[in-house]
Image (tube, helix red, strand yellow):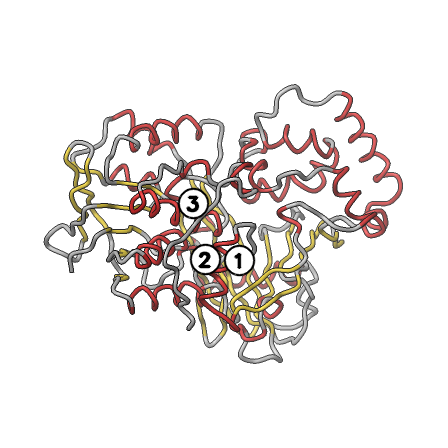
């Protein structure tokens, strides 16, 4: 084929870009390194049990994305009530905050100390909010930060909270404060992005959505090529001329390129090489990996949550998914429960290198230790490893990304999109939005700044997205 655009990566961003190109009668070629689409939003399967890699709520304020989701899956897109709680020192804390539950668990004395700490943060706030610790402490008080934020956050990122940039908190928990949380608990309602009460979900897991995208793209003249490992990205000055696969003798070429591969890999695969300063910046970016250990437990009803955040420092697990509570069709035997134990780590560290059998044993022990197995035995287990799952917002990341961004802005036929393509902790709706806007830049000649997606103004839809000639793929 002679594609109009080569898209690197078949996650939500890349597939959305390919679908949008098809609406404009362009032929995209999507190259995906894995054997299935969806990226970190894929669904894995083991013995008929389906495992969501990370727990993906489908919720957005971007109307075009919401409509696209519903067009793709129709009746297979179901409403799911949200229940997620914090587990800390043997007790469950409702999230969002419920006054009676929190007071009962903490006790009057500890609650009073948290309130005093909050008042102190209002009187004597941190003068700067450069770090995650400073950002959260200014909104909740230092004592509540230590109680509910520090342990889990450091499990996820593997570095102290005073080394994590405040940018991450600003993206993930916008507008949230103790005052807002108490107000929501007392009077109901919430306008906070992360505290929705209900969300949409594909009946067979998020991979169902991206497999449908793949099907529609292939049916309408595009191509999604799996197991396509890119070893070289050819360039002439500031123009991409082709991409080399390890399975193909000649570079694949197209007039335009859209990349959602990690910035580190993109820069280090350029040939001729990028300037040393840019290469150094790329090599300095960090990522966290995670391991999902799927357990099939011989019990029909372990706990009611979709997922639980494990703040208890005595165990390694960070988050626990209960897939039956996302969709019953994820579980073939309703007398059993499938659990996803999520462990955050670095690639090639001790946890990453552990044998699958040892990881399954660890997950089973910790589920029992937390009292969440109800004494039921583990019937089966499976391990999935996800490299480069989370771009790390350490104290140097911003300057490294800016160096790379300035360099890539000089390329006349390349745009980067998505979480890893921009080293930004986007939700999937914002990753999709970058794909849509990249195509509008290419096809319609617009000048959308993709790096503005998931900032405050774009989240509240001050930039409008308009898709042209949209067809209903479910029809």
Q: Secondary structure at mark 3?
A: helix
334 up-or-down from 242: above or below: below
Would you say residue 469 is visible in this rendering? Answer: yes
Sequence-first disc among 2 and 3: 2
The residue lying at 79 percent from left, 43 percent from top is 183
Q: Are marks 2 and 1 in contact (CB under 8 Å)?
A: yes
Query: Looking at the image, do the residues carrying marks 2 and 3 touch, with CB atoms under 8 Å apart?
Result: no
Which quadrant does the C terminus fall into?
bottom left
Vertical placement of residue 76 versus 34, above or below: below
Q: CA distance from mark 2 to mark 3?
A: 11 Å
Q: Residue at x 29, y 33 (%)?
A: 408
Number of marks present in the image shown: 3
Which element carries disc 1, helix, strand or loop?
loop
Q: At which x and y percent is residue 59?
A: 56, 55
Disc marking residue 56: 1
* Lateral position of residue 293 relative to residue 175, left or right: left
Determine the CA span between mark 2 and mark 1: 7 Å
Question: x, y (%) of residue 251?
Answer: 14, 50
Which residue in the structure is indicated by mark 2?
Answer: 41
Near mark 3 (Cα within 10 A), the count class, few <14, some 14-19 or many ≥20, is: many
Q: Position of residue 225 (x, y in %)?
A: 26, 61
Which residue is label 3 attached to?
Answer: 419
- Which callout, 3 or 1, points at the residue further toward the start of the chain? 1
Characterize the local packing of mark 1: few (<14), some (14-19) or many (20 or more) Cα atoms within 10 angstroms: many
Residue 269 location, quadrant? top left
Point out the residue furthest to the front here.
469
Closer to the chain start, of discs 2 and 1, is 2
Write the residue at 48% across / 59% down.
53
SS under mark 2? helix
Name the foreground residue: 415 vs 96. 415
User: Quadrant location of residue 197?
Assistant: bottom right
């Amino acid at each position: 084929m002679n594609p109009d655009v080569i898209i690197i990566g078949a996650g939500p961003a890349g597939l959305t870009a390919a679908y949008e190109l098809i609406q404009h009668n362009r032929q995209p070629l999507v190259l995906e390194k894995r054997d299935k689409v969806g990226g970190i939003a894929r669904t894995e399967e083991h013995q008929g049990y389906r495992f969501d890699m990370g727990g993906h709520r489908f919720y957005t304020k971007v109307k075009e994305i919401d409509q696209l989701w519903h067009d793709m899956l129709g009746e297979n897109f179901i409403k799911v009530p949200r229940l997620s709680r914090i587990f800390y020192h043997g007790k469950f804390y409702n999230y969002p905050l419920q006054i009676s539950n929190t007071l009962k668990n903490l006790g009057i004395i500890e609650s009073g100390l948290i309130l005093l700490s909050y008042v102190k943060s209002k009187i004597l706030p941190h003068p700067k909010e450069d770090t995650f610790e400073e950002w959260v402490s200014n909104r909740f008080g230092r004592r509540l930060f230590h109680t509910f934020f520090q342990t889990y956050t450091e499990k996820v990122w593997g570095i102290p909270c005073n080394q994590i940039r405040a940018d991450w908190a600003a993206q993930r928990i916008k507008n949230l404060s103790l005052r807002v949380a108490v107000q929501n608990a007392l009077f109901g309602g919430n306008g906070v992005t992360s505290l929705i009460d209900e969300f949409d979900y594909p009946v067979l897991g998020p991979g169902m959505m991206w497999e449908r995208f793949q099907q529609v793209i292939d049916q309408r003249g595009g191509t999604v090529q799996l197991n396509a490992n890119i070893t070289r990205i050819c360039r002439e000055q500031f123009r991409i001329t082709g991409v080399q696969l390890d399975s193909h003798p000649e570079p694949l070429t197209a007039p335009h390129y859209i990349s959602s591969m990690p910035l580190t890999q993109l820069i280090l695969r350029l040939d001729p090489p990028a300037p040393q300063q840019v290469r150094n910046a790329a090599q300095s970016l960090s990522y966290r990996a995670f391991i999902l250990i799927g357990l099939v437990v011989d019990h029909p009803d372990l706990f009611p949550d979709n997922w639980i955040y494990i703040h208890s420092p005595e165990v390694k697990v960070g988050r626990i998914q209960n897939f039956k509570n996302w969709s019953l069709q994820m579980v073939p035997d309703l007398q059993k429960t499938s659990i996803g134990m999520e462990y955050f780590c670095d690639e090639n560290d001790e946890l990453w290198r552990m044998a699958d059998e040892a990881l399954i044993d660890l997950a089973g022990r910790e589920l029992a230790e937390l009292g969440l197995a109800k004494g039921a035995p583990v019937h089966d287990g499976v391990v999935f490893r996800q490299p480069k799952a989370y771009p790390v917002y350490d104290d140097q990341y911003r300057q490294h990304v800016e160096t790379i961004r300035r360099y890539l802005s000089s390329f006349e036929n390349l745009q980067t999109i998505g979480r890893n393509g921009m080293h930004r902790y986007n939700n999937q709706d914002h990753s999709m939005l970058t794909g849509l806007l990249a195509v509008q830049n290419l096809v319609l000649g617009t000048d959308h700044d993709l790096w503005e997606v998931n900032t405050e103004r774009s989240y509240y839809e001050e930039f409008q997205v308009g898709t042209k000639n949209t067809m209903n793929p479910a029809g």
